[in-house]
Amino acid sequence: AKGKKELGLLLPEEVAREKTLDQIAETREKKKEARALRGMAGNTKNEVKKYKAQEKALDKKLAALAKSKRQQDARVARAKGRAAKAKQRAAKVEKAKRNREAKVASRKKAAQARADSKRRASEAKAAQAQRKKEKRIANEAAK
């Protein structure tokens, strides 16, 4: 992986594609060498023939690697799409979970508020009854 992410972070499909890219680079280098050797071979027909055959074989290998790379590119694209979809689904599930938790918390809060309100109302009623009772007692004592 030349200058790319660390190998650990790559999808298996991306690792395979990187290996193919390395093989393509190596094959191109070999082809350059074969071409240079053919140029230096001079006039000896057998040597020229040998290097031409090597070049032809390397061309075939390059074509096969290029095809392989195209297929791997498609695989990588699909794998990335799958990964993105899975990430989206996980985010959706997480969001739904948070919403459920928030809903439950909201209901609890509302129920607590109602209970507090009820309690305050009954306390106020009791206090009013107490004042009324004290007033009545004071009135009777005044008579």
Image (cartoon, helix red, strand yellow):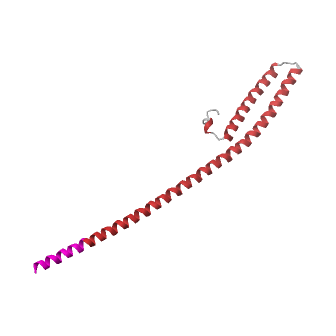
Q: Nearer the viewer, residue 42 or 57?
A: 57
Magenta span main SS: helix
* Above-or-below relation of 42 to 103: above
Give the residue drawn at x 75%, y 30%: 27
Query: How far across and how far down the image is residue 41, in percent?
Result: 83, 19
On-image quarter of the C terminus: bottom left
Residue 51 left/right relative to 92: right
On-image quarter of the N terminus: top right
Query: How far across and how far down the image is residue 136, in percent?
Result: 17, 78
Count the numbered circles shown. Answer: 0
- Residue 45 found in image quarter: top right
Give the residue drawn at x 64%, y 32%: 2
Query: How far across and how far down the image is residue 109, in percent?
Result: 40, 62
Give the residue drawn at x 37%, y 65%: 113
Magenta stretch contains residue 137:
yes
Query: How far across and how far down the image is residue 46, in percent?
Result: 89, 21
Q: Residue furthest right?
A: 45
Give the residue drawn at x 43%, y 62%: 106
Q: Nearer the viewer, residue 60 or 6?
A: 6
Magenta stretch contains residue 16:
no
* Above-or-below relation of 79 to 114: above
User: Magenta part of the protein: which range?
Assistant: 127-143
Q: Residue furthest left?
A: 143
